[in-house]
Amino acid sequence: MIKLGILIGPKGRGSNMLAIANACQSKRIEASIKVVVSPVSESDAVAKATEMGLRIKFVSPTSANYAIGLLASLEGCDLVCLAGFMRLLPAEVLSAFPNRILNIHPALLPKFGGKGMYGNHVHEAVIAAGETESGCTVHFVSDRYDEGEVILQRRCAVLPSDTIETLAARVLTEEHLAYPEAIRKVIENL
Ligand code: GRF
């Protein structure tokens, strides 16, 4: 059974973490969540993880031993999934998990990615560019923002009536399908 480490961010909602946890529970993916790693002790994602009985570790990005702390918390994990985690990972962590760290981005990369392209900034830019299609991308994580190899994408329409919020919600629905699907694909190729 593949063991997953989930890295969440400081303001995590935890909806992708939940989608992955549900896919594990329903056996849509042959994996289990070994640990959820959070930079803060309180967030919606931490509350959800606690409620689900998941093991949680707190690792502060401002600590001197950040890389060591992350590596220790991820010990025994086969794959690492970033879900709302917005930093570049320390080189030590990248090299400990070659082609085994995944991220989800709320747009069709390589468009609308890179530093500063997160959350609603992404959807705002998609609407401003007059795109008729958006979606999400699950990709391997590299040492640059949003540039690793694409694992899979799911697409959805951008409607003329869309606001940032309506588009974000449509994309999020696709994210919850895409992440488990991508994990399954990676596991099949391990
Ligand atoms: C998602 O939109 C994901 O694409 C991005 O961060 C957000 C995390 O949302 N990387 P949630 O915490 O999983 O609900």
Image (spheres, helix red, strand yellow):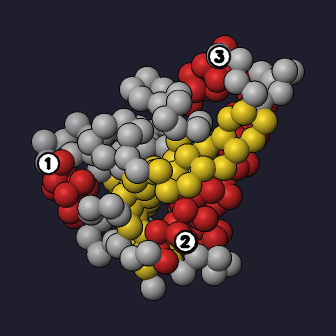
Inspect this view and state whether residue 46 appears.
no
Amino acid type at mark 3: Ala
**Residue at left 53%, top 28%?**
112
Q: In which quarter of the image is residue 56?
A: bottom left
Q: In which quarter of the image is residue 20?
A: bottom right
Position of 56 compared to 27: left or right? left
Residue 180 placed where, x, y %?
A: 59, 64
Check disc 2: other Cα within 10 Å, few if <14, some if 14-19, many if 20+. some
Q: How far apart are marks 3 and 2 (CA)?
A: 33 Å
Amino acid type at mark 2: Arg
The answer to whether the beta carbon of the residue marked 2 is less than 8 Å from any atom of ligand 1 is: no
> Mark 2: which secondary structure?
helix
Disc number placed over residue 129 in the picture, else none? 3
Amino acid type at mark 1: Asn
* Image: 100 above or below 65: below
Mark 3 vs mark 1: which is more N-terminal? 1
Mark 2 vs mark 1: which is more N-terminal? 1
Position of 45 compared to 161: left or right? left
* Image: 50 above or below 78: above
* Image: 124 above or below 87: above
Position of 98 compared to 159: left or right? left
